[in-house]
Every structure is written in structure tokens, then in C-alpha cells.
Image: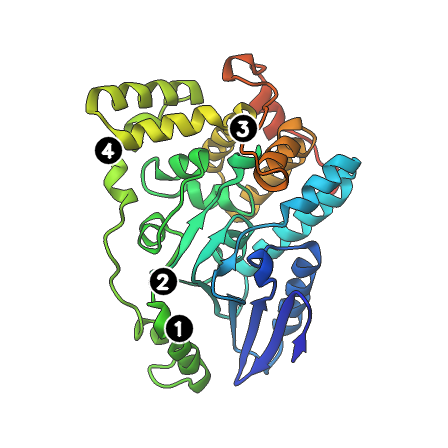
Amino acid sequence: MSETAEVSIRVHDGIGHLTLNRPEALNALTHSMVLLLTEALTAWRDSSEVSLVVLDGAGDRGLCAGGDVRVLYDNAVSGDTAASLAFLRDEYRLNAMIAEYPKPFVAIMDGVTMGGGIGLAGHASIRVVTERSKLAMPETRIGFCPDVGGTWLLARAPGELGTYLALSSATMSGSDALVLGFADYFVPSRLLPHLLLAFAERADPGSPSEIVLLFDETPEPSELSLRRDWVDACFSADTVSEIIARLDDYAATHSSEEARAAADALVSLSPTAVTVTLAALREARGLPGLRAALELEHRVCAWLLDQPDLREGIRAQIIDKDRSPRWNPARLDLLSPDLAARALQHPVTDPLW
């Protein structure tokens, strides 16, 4: 058993248990946490003492709020892009390791699971949500793009729901996550201790998936799925400007507060971030697998690290918390026509694999 300030790593009853342990920061991921998780999973891959891995978060607020963006801000202010790139590189490699892990990997997304938390849990072989789950890829709020394999998951959500979530940074419930392909099972939070005990006891029917089914319940209907008609109609447009125009029209003709809120959200976000995000999602739809999507995100995010909107977005949301970012460029019509292409084709010197 190994306890660190940031990750609890222990083995018992054949279970390798990983607990993100920064509850005061909603278990936001640091570079050292990524390396600790990678080291543990590497050691357990061929260990006869571990037959199942469980990931959860300390505290009662959630699994993980995402990457520690304060560090990205500090690096941006000091000009240390290399440190941010190293963190993202190791994080993406960990995401791929989880997706390809040879042993059952159970991720428990009770409470908040966003950004980097999705990168850890969204690619697990057994993904559990609860009635308390709140999932999101909210990167556009800070002038960034969904990464950690988020483009791969979002691009495969039904219809244009993934585009809607990515561009507007909207939040999913546990029910939504099941419909959109971000989760596999719904287990009420009160039953989670019993689920963990069942894993330890290995009672029949035996396999981890079959054990989870013993606790799986039918959640309330997905509210996001009820928005499919107008989301598909509006977010299928080729550009962000056209998406906003369609939302404006739908909101006016159908008196839709939800469509109006979506349009207002897109107008308030970084023009650079939403434009690059839309292009990355459309590109991800044609990719062969998660690794290719992570390579795409690696290029895009390396480019975004050098743009002013990331630092400004983190300042407005996290540092000063004035919620009044000054984007540069400030409007969609001021963007260079080749902006998205430059981001998607950005060269990286240190490949992921």
C-alpha cells in the first residue's frame, strides 16, 4: 500500500485501487499524479496480485474536476510551454494505457467528472455513473479544446449531441452519459460501497461486468436526448457562425429558451477555441481509433498553448474569477480563414508514441 499526498495506491483482495487524493481541489490532476497513476498501472499490468483495477476520487464532491489549469496558467505567464506540453503528453499516454489495459478497469464517476477526469474514466472498460454524476468537457470556457480523448468520445455521441456538448461546455447527468456513450452502468451512490465489497469477495456470477450488473439500475430519462431535434438541426452546420444563426432562428420561431441559451453561450466563448473545437470534432469522426484522436488533440492543444485566449480564459474563470474574458480575436468574423487548419496541422517535435 502506498499513500501519497495526491494519489492513494493500494492492493487488496486482488484489486488494485487508485484514489485521486486532492479533495480540496476536487482531485484536479497534476503532472505528478499522472506519473504516479502510470507507474502503478505499469507495475500491475503483469502482476499476479492484481486482477482488477478500480479508480475513484477522495471526498464527496467527485472523481476529478480536470487538469490543474492553474499550472497551465503559470506556465503560460512564465513562457514555459515545454512544461505544459510534457504534462499533456504524459496525460495522453496514460489515457491510451487505460483504454488498452489488459485487465478490467472500473472507473467510478460519482459526482463531478470533467476534462482530465473524463480522460481517466471515459476510456475505462467498466464506467459507472450515479445520480450525483456531473460530466463535462468544458475546455472552451477557458479558450481550449476538448482533449484527453474527448474528441473521440464526443464525435461518436448520437447525432450532434457531442458537438453541442463540446462547443457549449454543457454538463451531462449520469443518464445523459449513458446515452452519449460516456458510461456503461448506473449504480446509485448508496450502493457503491457494496459494489466494491462484491468486487473484493468475487461472489458469483464472478466477472466484474456481471458483478456491476447486480447493482445496475435504470436511471431517470436523459434530458439531453430530448433536445436531439433542435441540436441536430442547428449543430450540424459547417461553421460556428452558421450554428449560432440556426440557434437564433430556432429560438425565435419556437420560443426555445434552451436554444437561446446555447446561442448565447457560443457567442460568449473564445472564437478561436470554438472554431478549432468544431474542426477537431469533425476530423475525429473519420479517425481509426483513440490513439489517432489523441495525436490530433496533441497537435491542436500544442497550438492552443501558444495562443492568448488560453491564458485569458484561465485568468477569467480560475484566477481572477471575474467571468469577463477579453478574447483575442474578439469575434468570429475576425478570425483568419486558415486558423483551424493551422491548429489541426500544427507540428509537434515529441510524438506521443
x then y, percent, for residue 86: 73, 47
Residue closest to the far left:
254
State the CA–CA distance, disc 2 to disc 1.
9 Å
Mark 4 crowdedness (10 Å alpha carbons): few <14, some 14-19, many ≥20: few
Give the spatial CA distance, label 2 vs label 4. Answer: 27 Å
Q: Earlier in the sequence, mark 2 or mark 1?
A: 2
The residue sitting at 49% across, 32% down in the picture is: 283
Whether pointer 3 and pointer 1 mark residues with C-beta atoms closer than 8 Å, the reply is no
- At horizontal 71% and vertical 43% (from top left) the residue drawn is 84
The amino acid pointed to by label 1 is: Leu
Secondary structure beneath disc 3? Answer: helix
Read off the residue under disc 3: 276
What amino acid is at disc 4? Asp
Residue density around tag 2, few if under 14, some if 14–19, many if 20 or more, within 10 Å: many
Above or below, 113 relative to 316: below
Q: How is the image coloured?
A: rainbow
Between circles 2 and 3, the one closer to the viewer is 2
Provide the residue designation for mark 1.
192
